[in-house]
Every structure is written in C-alpha cells, then in structure tokens.
Image (cartoon, helix red, strand yellow):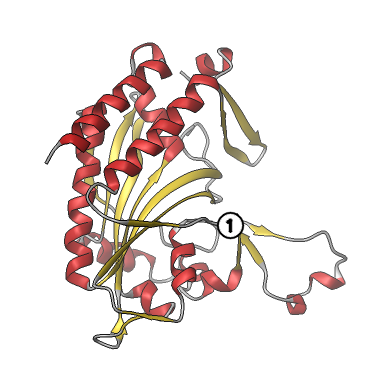
Amino acid sequence: MMKELQQRKLLSIVQSQNGLIGYRFSDSLYAAAELLDKALLQVLSKGISVTSHTCTTLLPRSTLERISFFDKLPSNPLHVYPHLTHDAMSENSGDAWVLSPSTCYHTFAHLAESTHDWELKYFTAKGQCHRYEPAKDEPTRMGNFTMRELILVGLQEKVETHCEIIFGQAVKFLRLLFPSLSVEKASDVFYGEHSKVTRKVQLSMGVKCEILIPWFDKYNVSVGSRNLHRDLFTTNFNIVSRASDCPMHSACIAFGMERLLLALLAHTLNYEPDLLVENIAQAAEIILEEK
C-alpha cells in the first residue's frame, strides 16, 4: 500500500539512517486526514463543551522533569540544541529544550499552579509529537507524528466515568469504519529499575487501554488509547480543587492520527482515500445523530 500511495504522489516518506521520521500527505490523502481529525473531534466532543488550546513544538525540559519523565522514558525524548559554541552549551547555560513527546503535557503546563471550582472540564489539542523509537519494517512507528487528545480534569469519579463514556463513543465510531478492531488493556513502555513492576501495576489497575487495528497480516497497530492518570500529573503540576484543597484527577483519550488514517486506509477498497472520506462522513453522521 505504501509504495502505491507513493507512486500516486499521495504520500512521501521522510526518513534518515536513524529510522522513519514521518510522512507528508497530499491531495485526497491530505483531505482524508483533515476530515478524520474533524470527525473524530466531533465524536469526542459530542454533547459536551470542550476548551481547545494550541501546543508548541518545543518544551522546556523542566516541564517533563516535573513528572520524572526522564527516569521512566530516558531514550524517547529528542533534545534540541541551539547552534552555539561548546562552552555555551554547558549544563549551566539554562533550561534545555526538548521536542514535545505528547500534547497533554501542554494542558497540564497551561494549568500549572492553579486552583479551580469546576467538577469536570474538557480540553483538546492537536500537536506534533516526537519520540525516538526506531524500528525496522514498522511503517506505523514514526519519530514525528500528529496526536489528537481529549483531556479531562476534575473530580475522580467524574473524570473516570465520563472518560469511559467518551472513549466508548470513539470506539463505536471507529468500529463503523473497521468492525474487527479490538480494545485491550495495555501499559506504557517504561524503563529503569522498577519498570516491570510499573507495567504490572498499570495492567492490573486497568489505567490504560488501547484500540488495535491489524496492519495487514503483520501486527496490530495501536491507533488510540485511554489513560487514567489519577492524580499523578495534577499533583506534580499543582492543579487543585478549591472544594477539597486536594489535587484534581485527570485522564486523556489520545489518537496517533497518521497511524489511524493509514490503518483505516489499509482496509479500504483499492486504498482509495476518496472512499475512506465517504466512509468517515457516514460513520460520523450516524454517531452524531444518535440521541
């Protein structure tokens, strides 16, 4: 499929000796990507009021250090260094920059050091994310990809209940596009001394689950996930409920948009973006018209 899309000039590959960086979408494939994001956001935000925000490509390293990101995922982040002399690049030259690995960190940084009256609030953002996860022959694992997220912040019961409802709505929408998708418990890929224990805890508590779509006959692609953060991020970013004077809870529903688009296209007749556009529009209409 990928070679055919390249030949049709609908897609070009950005890569280096270090691995796959990402893709450029063009023409009808670009149109399908735009519609998929629009429809997915409509499904995620059905019946609720959502606050949108932007994301920067760069983040200060200190933002991720607040959640011990580099202890758990030391090899994933990509650092950015200005073109300076060696002396100026010492550790004492200031807060280092990293390429943003996820969109929800921008939400928490935006809300940092704040106290709120709401029981539940929804945020959404679409951003360019960057992770160093080189893999051979995995066209769905990119160093640079687009992430759409819905982030919930509020009281624990409200966050967890409504996150499940919205995630279920998204799964229902995607099942209209590919009925054989599966949803499974999952864990993040942690590193370090306690990584195995952390993964087991995540799996046993069911704090993360993933939507899986087959990539031909090779492997399943995780195209989206639901993550219950509990009070981990809100504690570290000091996002507090005025009523309880305690950290709020948070959760997110996240989708890798290139992965999702290509996985759906792989199961579309003749890998035709125009047909996928029709299918997306019909599926979204069904979900949005339901009471």
Where does the image place residue 36, in percent across and percent down from the top left? Answer: 38, 33
Q: Nearer the viewer, residue 280 or 73?
A: 280
Q: Count residues near mark 1 (Cα–Cα under 10 Å), then give few for <14, some for 14-19, many for 20+.
A: few
Q: Is residue 266 visible?
A: no
With respect to residue 85, does 142 lie above or below?
above
Which quadrant, please, contains the C terminus?
A: top left
Q: Tell me what residue is drawn at x 46 percent, y 76 percent.
A: 112
Location of residue 119 by image quarter: bottom left
User: Hey, what amino acid is under mark 1?
Assistant: Thr
67 shown above or below 285: below
Does residue 40 appear anywhere in the picture?
yes
In this picture, residue 96 sits left or right of residue 258: right
Residue drawn at x 49%, y 76% is: 66
Given residues 8 and 242, the one toward you in this image is: 242
Give the number of callouts. 1
Residue 251: horizontal and vertical position, in percent? 30, 62
Left or right, 56 with reference to 104: right
Q: Residue furthest left?
A: 291
163 and 19: which is toward the camera: 163
Snapshot quadrant of residue 248? bottom left
> In the image, residue 63 lies at what x, y percent?
54, 71
In the rendering, at what x and y percent does residue 111 appear?
Answer: 44, 72
Q: SS of the residue at dot 1?
A: loop
The residue under the point 44% across, 69% down is 108
Q: What residue is shown with label 1?
A: 56
The residue lying at 67 percent from left, 37 percent from top is 16
